[in-house]
Image (cartoon, rainbow, N blue to C red):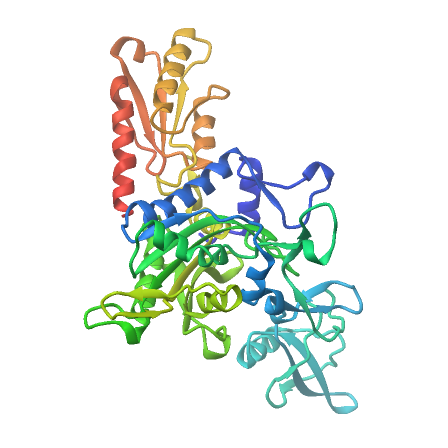
């Protein structure tokens, strides 16, 4: 089934995944708070990324750099002068838009006849290209002012000036808008006190390149990974947690030799770029996203940043369409060279085998923790009819599931069942996130846990008191089996470990 964004938003609000921030005050546009279930899901996504890059490899180190940095960092990186978006305003409804996000507007000339003879009319449609414009014109039966009679398309669609997507009004000329949030350190708001909330975590890695390389005794190739909050004053945020002004990044800067510095058998920078393209695409697949919902889109030459040698996006088929999930770029030596120039610090790498200094190249896989969380949510969500009743389930990879196990007493009015169930839940909590619940009938309890992706539900019933066995239910198959109560922890732990091994 194809999931809608409305269904995901509704689930998140209803089941405690994500709430509108500052909701009791009317909310703040495009800001969101992760609730008890959502914070666990997002934490598990970040943990899976960290574990895959740091714990399961021997060539990457971790870092947690400060959000506030010396303002010259952003001068050197080009953010102060160039981190801008083209902004336009609608003259009619006063809404603001990013010019490069506006749909293309095509004018199509139509001709036909009415009682007075042959007439023509020009209509405008928002379309991706000329073919799409023609398709939309042919599908449209009524244009409002269109005279009656047979209509034919006269000539090719012509690209025209964009109009407001909201009301169709005329737009102002674009002006550049810097996306960085500016603030001040200290009690006086003066030019010397200006600092910025970081718009990306990458620069914190670049300025610590020498520190990490020296203290960890690293040689090329090696990487530095970081997870952290970033801030961008987006003109048109939206689509739930897909684009927000405050977001969390998962970035890796992988430092390697430039191609002309490699000896036979060593990966060149472009070969490392190809390697990380495949590695990052497969990471999403290993944690449960279906292959048909992922694709790689390589940037055309006119899309590339001036310093980039290559860039590709891992795209996911969100409810809003195919959109970027992660970018993998070959940033060459641009960032380290810029920081050398502006700081006066020698950030070159000394290659002992070659006996020379040079600036490493950088391959950057840059992902968003919020977008990744949204993608895993969308891909895991499904609705089905079971025994005449609707069932909603999040078939999340076990490693990502917010809660691993839920324990229920079959009858909450029997103290001995409640006591056994609560004791089992306490024992399981020492191994993995487990909850106890007795607030509804067993069928409703199952449905609640299905909706938040809990892989295993364990029920303590009357027979448990005599045979020492409980019922364990699997989320996806809904199959139930009886096992000894003392084996519950080992059974679930084994299945969770097998899921992790399957994702390696």
Residue at image position (55%, 36%) is 35
Tell whether 475 sits left or right of 174: left
Vertical placement of residue 481 versus 50, above or below: above
User: Is residue 229 in view?
Assistant: yes
Vertical placement of residue 350 versus 444, above or below: below
**Where, by quadrant of the figure, is residue 495 drawn?**
top left
Residue at image position (73%, 79%) is 146
Frontmost residue, 20 versus 251: 251
Give residue 499's position: percent from left, percent from top.
28, 41
**Where, by quadrant of the figure, is residue 196 drawn?**
bottom right
Of all residues, the one furthest to the bottom in this rendering is 117
Vertical placement of residue 237 versus 45, above or below: below
Give residue 17's position: percent from left, percent from top.
53, 38
Tell whether 238 sits left or right of 316: right
Residue at image position (68%, 39%) is 23
Frontmost residue, 65 versus 406: 65
């Amino acid at each position: 089934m194809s999931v809608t964004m409305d269904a995901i938003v509704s689930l998140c609000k209803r089941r405690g995944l994500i709430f509108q921030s500052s909701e009791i005050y009317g909310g703040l546009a495009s800001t969101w708070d992760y609730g008890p279930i959502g914070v666990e899901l997002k934490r598990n996504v970040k943990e899976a990324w960290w574990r895959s890059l740091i714990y399961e490899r021997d060539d990457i180190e971790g870092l947690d750099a400060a959000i506030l940095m010396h303002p010259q960092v952003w001068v050197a990186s080009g953010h102060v002068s160039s981190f801008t978006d083209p902004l336009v305003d609608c003259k009619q409804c006063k809404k603001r838009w990013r010019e490069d996000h506006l749909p293309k507007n095509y004018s199509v000339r139509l001709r036909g006849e009415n009682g007075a003879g042959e007439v023509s009319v020009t209509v405008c449609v928002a379309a991706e290209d000329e073919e799409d414009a023609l398709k939309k014109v042919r599908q449209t039966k009524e244009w409002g002012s269109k005279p009656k009679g047979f209509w034919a398309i006269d000539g090719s669609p012509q690209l025209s000036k964009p109009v407001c997507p909201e009301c169709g009004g005329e737009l102002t000329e674009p002006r550049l808008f810097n996306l960085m949030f500016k603030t001040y350190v200290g009690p006086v708001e003066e030019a010397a006190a200006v600092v910025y909330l970081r718009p990306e975590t990458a620069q914190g890695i670049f300025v610590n390149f020498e520190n990490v390389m020296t203290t960890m005794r690293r040689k090329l190739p090696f990487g530095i990974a970081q997870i952290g909050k970033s801030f961008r004053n987006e003109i048109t945020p939206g689509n739930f947690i897909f684009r927000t002004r405050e977001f969390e990044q998962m970035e890796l800067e992988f430092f390697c030799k430039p191609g002309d510095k490699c000896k036979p058998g060593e990966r060149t920078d472009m070969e490392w770029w190809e390697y990380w393209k495949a590695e990052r695409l497969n990471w999403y697949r290993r944690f449960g996203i279906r292959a048909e919902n992922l694709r790689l889109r390589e940037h055309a030459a006119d899309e590339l940043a001036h310093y980039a040698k290559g860039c590709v996006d891992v795209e996911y088929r969100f409810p809003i369409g195919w959109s970027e999930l992660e970018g993998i770029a070959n940033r060459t030596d641009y960032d380290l060279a810029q920081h050398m120039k502006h700081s006066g610090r020698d950030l070159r790498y000394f290659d002992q085998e070659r006996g020379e200094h040079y600036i490493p190249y950088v391959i950057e896989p840059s992902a968003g923790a919020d977008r990744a969380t949204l993608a895993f949510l969308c891909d895991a969500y499904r609705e089905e009819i079971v025994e005449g009743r609707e069932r909603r389930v999040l078939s999340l990879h076990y490693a990502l599931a917010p809660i691993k196990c839920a324990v229920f007493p079959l009858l909450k009015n029997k103290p001995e069942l409640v006591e056994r169930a609560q004791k089992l839940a306490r024992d399981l909590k020492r191994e993995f996130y487990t909850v106890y619940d007795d607030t509804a009938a067993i069928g409703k309890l199952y449905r609640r846990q299905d909706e938040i992706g809990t892989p295993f539900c364990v029920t303590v019933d009357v027979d448990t008191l005599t045979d020492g066995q409980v019922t364990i239910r699997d989320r996806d198959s809904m199959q139930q089996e009886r096992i000894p109560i003392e084996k519950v922890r080992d059974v679930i732990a084994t299945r969770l470990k097998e899921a992790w091994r399957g994702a390696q």
